[in-house]
Amino acid sequence: EPSADWWKSSVVYQIYPSSFKDSDGDGVGDLAGIVEKLDYLKLLGVDVVWLSPVYPSPWDDNGYDISDYTGIDPRFGTLEDWDRLRDGLHERGMRLVMDLVINHTSDRHPWFTASREGDEDKKDFYFWRPGRDGGPPNNWGSVFSGPAWTYDQTRGEYYLHLFSPSQPDLNWENPRVRAAVHEVALWWLARGADGFRMDVINFVSKNPKLPDGPVAGDYGIFAEHAINGPRLHEFLHEMHERAFAGRDVLTVGEMPGVSVEQARIHTNPVNRELDMVFQFEHVDLDHGPGGKFDPRPLDLVRLKASLNRWQVGLNDRGWNSLYWNNHDQPRVVSRFGDDGRYRVESATAIATTLHMMQGTPYVYQGEELGMTNAHMDDIADYRDLETLNYHRTMVETGKVDAKAAMAGITRMSRDNARTPMQWTAGENAGFTTGTPWIGVNPNHIGINAEAAVADEGSVFHHYRRLIALRKEHPVIVHGSFTPLLEEDPRVYAYTRTLNGQVLLVLANWSDQRAEAELPGDLAAADAELLLGNLPDPGPVAAPLRPWEARVHLIR
Ligand code: TEU
C-alpha cells in the first residue's frame, strides 16, 4: 500500500473551469486558461486542484450532466490540454483530482439513448418504471423543482432523475453499471489523475421499492428512500477495491444529508471506502422553513455546535473535509461575514476558524481573495438552472412572495459562486477578452488577484500564511480538537493538542469588541503568536477586536 496520508496535510483548491480563466476569448474559461495560472496556485501554496467537470456535456447543469466520461468538452479544449494541465501541476508538486459525477449521466449519454431504446445490455442501466394512476410511479420531487420522474415516449415508461430531467439516475443495483463506473475511474487514473471528488455519492443506493416519501408542498421528499441507502457501504467498498486500492489517490465523496455517525464509517480507513466526505450540516444552518431561498441569519452557537461535533466525532476514526465554499454555495464573506466595512477582517477570521481545524481544507476559487456575492437582483442575470427553475415554479406562479423570494435568490443562489474569477481591475476582471458567459462582479475594481498579491495585508496573503502554517506544525494536521466557549455568541474558540503542544485558536465573529473568557491556565499561558489577521495582535488574554482572529502556540 502506498502511504495514504499525504492528503491529510494537503490543502485542496477547487477550480470551476468555466469561470476561472478564458484563454481564447469565447467568454468561457478553459483548460489552457488554468495552465496560465499555475504559478498563482503555487504562490498560494495549495497541494491539490479539484477540477469541476470538463467532460462533454449538453450543459444543462453546467457540466454535472455528462454525455461522455472520457473526453473533454470542446469549450474547455482537448485531452492534450488536460495532459498539459496534469503535467504543469505535477511539475510544480501539485496533484489533480477529477470530479466524478456517477449518480447520474446526461440524458444524451449513449448509455441513456440505448437504455430508452430497450438495448439488451443497457435497458436496466437506469430506473425505469410504469406510471401509477396516470401519473409518475411515486410522489418524489426533484432537487431542481418539479417531479423526480419524466415520461419517455420511446420507452413508454417513466425514468427517475433526482436532479434535472436531463440527469437520469444510474441504476447501481445493476452490477454492469457499477463495473462501467469503475472503468471510468480507472481510465482517468491511467491517464494520470490523482483522485476523485464524487458527486452526490450517497445517493447511489436507493430503496429498491422506491416508496413514496413524506409530502412537503407539491411532492414527497425522497431523502429517506434515496440517500444513504441500504447498499451504500457495499457499493463504496467495492469501488474502493476495484479502482482505488493500492493506488496513491485522494477520494472525497459529496454527501448531502450524511450524519457524523455515517461519515465515521465511510472515512474509517479500515472500512476501505473513502478518504473523506463533504457533509452539509454547517451550510444548511441558515436555510429557513421554505428552504435555501428562504434564508435565516446564522446563529454562531449553532454553527459551533455543528462543526465541533464533526471535529470530535471523526477524531482518530475518520477524517474531515473542511469547507465554507464551493460552486453550489454563496460566498462565505457575504453569507457569514461582513462584505462591507469588515470584508478583509471577516474573510480572514472565518478562514482562520476553519483552517486550524482537523481535516483537509478546501479553498474555492476566489475565496482566497475575499470575493463576495454578486448581489444580482434581476432574474435575467442568472444562469443556474436551480435558481431559474425555482423562479419559474415558485415565484412566477405566485406560490411564494416575489420580493422576499428574489431577496432569497440574491443571497443564496449558486451563481454567487460562479461569477468570473477576478484577476485584475481591468475589463472583465482580466477573465476574458470576449463577453463573459455570466456577469463579472463590478467590485473587481477593488477586489482582484493582482492587487491582492501586491498587498501583504490582503485576504490572499492570509490564506497563503494559513496554508504555510499547516506545513510547519504537525499539531494543525494531527492534533486532537477541544471546543471552548461553546455558548459564547461572538467568539469561536478551540484548542488543538499534540504531544503536549497546544494550539489555541480565537476568532471574533462580530463587529463588536469581545472578551474571550478562557480557562485560567490558558489565559495565563506563555504563548507564541503564530498568526493574527489584524496589525499588532496582543497576547492570549487581550480582548478581540471586531473580526479579529489569532492563533497562539502554547509549549
Ligand atoms: O450537488 C449536490 C447537491 O445536492 C446540492 O449541493 C445541490 O446542487 C444544491 O446545492 C441544492 O440546493 C452536486 C453538484 O455539486 C451540483 O453542482 C450539481 O448540480 C448536483 O450535484 C447534480 O449533479
Image: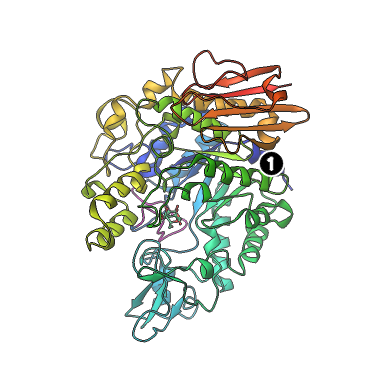
- Residue 471, percent across and down? 64, 28
User: Which element carries disc 1, helix, strand or loop?
Assistant: helix
Q: Is residue 297 left or right of residue 353?
A: left
- Residue 500, percent across and down? 78, 28
Magenta region: which residues? 61-75
Extreme-right residue of the structure: 499
Which residue sits at x=71%, y=57%? 271
Q: Is 469 within the magenta?
A: no
Extreme-bottom residue of the structure: 133
Q: Is residue 248 left or right of residue 197?
A: right
User: Where 177 falls versus 133 (above or below)?
Assistant: above
Which residue sits at x=53%, y=68%? 224
Q: Is residue 47 visible?
A: no
Front position in the image: 438 or 395:
395
Which residue sits at x=56%, y=24%? 515
Which residue sits at x=28%, y=56%? 388
User: Where 339 falls versus 380 (above or below)?
Assistant: above
User: Where 88 falls versus 542 (above or below)?
Assistant: below
Q: Amino acid at mark 1?
A: Asp
Taking the image in four quarters, ligand 1 sits in the one at bottom left
Q: Is residue 96 left or right of residue 482?
A: left
Extreme-top residue of the structure: 536
- Residue 153, percent across and down? 32, 80
Residue beneath disc 1: 5
Q: Is residue 364 visible?
A: yes
Tell me the quarter of the picture where residue 32 sits: top left
Q: Is mark 1 within 8 Å of ligand 1?
A: no
Front position in the image: 2 or 421:
421
- Residue 393, percent across and down? 27, 63
Tell me the quarter of the picture where residue 400 sits: bottom left
